[in-house]
Amino acid sequence: MRSIEIPHPGERDWRYRAFEILPGTLTWTILALPAVLGFISPRLAAYFIITYLLLWFVRAIALNIRVLQGWRIMNQHQKLPWKSMNQDLETLQPKTAGAPRWHAKNLQRVEKYIGDRRIKPSQIVHALIVATWNESRDTLEPTVRSILASNYDMKKVIFILAYENRGGPEVEVRAQQLVNDYKGKFMHAVATKHIDLPGEIIGKGGNITYAGRQLKKYLEAEDIDPAHVLVTTLDSDNRPDKQYLSALTYTYCSTEEPKYASYQPIPMFLNNIWDAPAPMRVIATGNSFWMLVQSMRPHTLRNFSAHAQPMSALIETDFWSVRTVVEDGHHYWRTYFRYDGHHDVYPIYVPIYQDAVLTEKYLRTLKAQFIQIRRWAWGASDIAYVAYQGFMKKNNIPKYKVASKFLRLLEGHISWSTAPLILLFAALVPFFLNPQSYIANQLPQVASRLQTVAMVGIFITLFLSVRSLPPKPARYKRHRTFFMIIQWVYLPLTTITFSASAAIYSQTRLMFGRYLGKFDLTEKAVRK
């Protein structure tokens, strides 16, 4: 079986390095284009900038439509009677009152196309791996309680608290105590201690992989079929919606080829949204709505943060990569190439609630936010991996499919690093370089009009952000709600200072082979 692991730095030849250099090169080239074209010809610069603005104008309209669709579907799915619908799926008889119209059609499809091969809801066992390093019990315990509050039988749920040996004795005592306090409520509960091994990146990938291997031993001892076990990975602050396990069960049991699928709920960064500073609230809300948009585009959907996959597939992919800090998004590609392109991600339209970035001090919070986005932006390293596995190693995937996915991945990271800067500032560059040019003088006005119309999207985001807020803690007065509205004046600043800058930083670092050697944990303070 061919290797699907990321090559060590010393094993990467010039071709691999060329694709690591590619995203940073494209980013700096695009950022320089307005100035270069402005020197050569104001007309060329104007054509480039207006074309770019129009492209993003159309894209902004599409994104606004998608976020409204995603919001509507998520709210509908949170209210569905998933438990009763799973009982219908067990017998293939639509008896649930209030079930959506697609439910009966879904049962017919399962009976027709899956038949005797199907896995029934009653056969499903859920395993939840919660990864922790040094988070406090105040962070971890609400996660455990949210799992227990699920509308699901906990005697069919395995709970694994995966902690790091580098956290020291205090972390070990905390993990063992928490498991001991709650283990009677689960089918099985255990705390696993991961010890860093040579060749591993210090971080989450190695931790949850070790926990997965311990789970494999338990399933073998209990004679439980791995195909019947759905594994969800959670960070320490991830709190599943009460419908998550039931919705995941239903989706998995109605998937025609479940081994070749993974399942992505919708991350919503709302746990501590009232406590986080205003810039962090804007970023957290924007990230939440971006994940809603992604859920409406399954062809671009990738694993992010909390995600689920059958144990049978995890065993065949040797679990998660231990050589990257973005083990979640990378795991899509890892599975995609293990099964020669036969892999899809299915959205689960219920949320996993997560924390916005918050530390004990304001400046430290700003730094932690940048580090978190920088880590996410390190997903640009997958561009070289996809080129390596797709074009440089033997596989049975049609090359046009690999090329399509490769280009979409590349475009996503280049847009991440360049779009905010080009949209906000590019129209001014020809004007400053050629103030006497009529076209250069008109360009900022044209750009301003397009940007004004595109601002409608901010009002949609503002409306949905207010609707999505959890109840206001009693410690805050009424004016806090007003601040939650006017906080959106920070949007241009946060988009450039954190999002674009973090992507540029990661791509530039990757260009020069300065690899991230550890998973930078995002500090999670709890305000009481």
Image (spheres, rainbow, N blue to C red):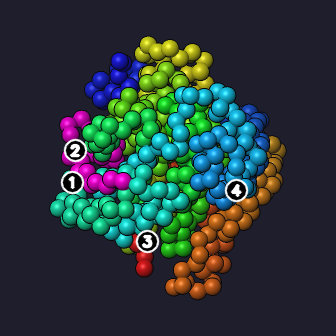
Return the disc, 1 or 4, that comes first in the chain's sequence: 4
The residue indicated by pointer 3 is: 362
Q: Nearer the viewer, residue 332 or 310?
A: 310
Task: Report the disc number at residue 417.
Answer: none
* Spatial CA span between label 1 and label 3: 27 Å
Which marked residue is nearer to the observer: mark 1 or mark 4? 4
Residue 195 percent across, percent down from the top left: 20, 46
* Spatial CA span between label 3 and label 4: 37 Å
Q: Nearer the viewer, residue 343 or 48?
A: 343
Question: What residue type is disc 2 on?
Answer: Asp
- Looking at the rendered structure, the secondary structure element under dot 1 is helix
Residue 231 percent across, percent down from the top left: 42, 44
Which range is magenta? 187-208
Return the disc, 1 or 2, that comes first in the chain's sequence: 1
Q: Nearer the viewer, residue 108 or 201?
A: 108
The residue indicated by pointer 2 is: 196
* Spatial CA span between label 4 and label 2: 43 Å
The residue indicated by pointer 4 is: 76
Question: What residue type is disc 4 on?
Answer: Gln
Residue 338 visible (yes or no): yes
Which marked residue is nearer to the observer: mark 1 or mark 3? 1
Q: Nearer the viewer, residue 507 or 58?
A: 58
CA neighbours of label 4 inside 10 A, class few (<14), some (14 to 19), many (20+): few
* Spatial CA span between label 1 and label 4: 43 Å
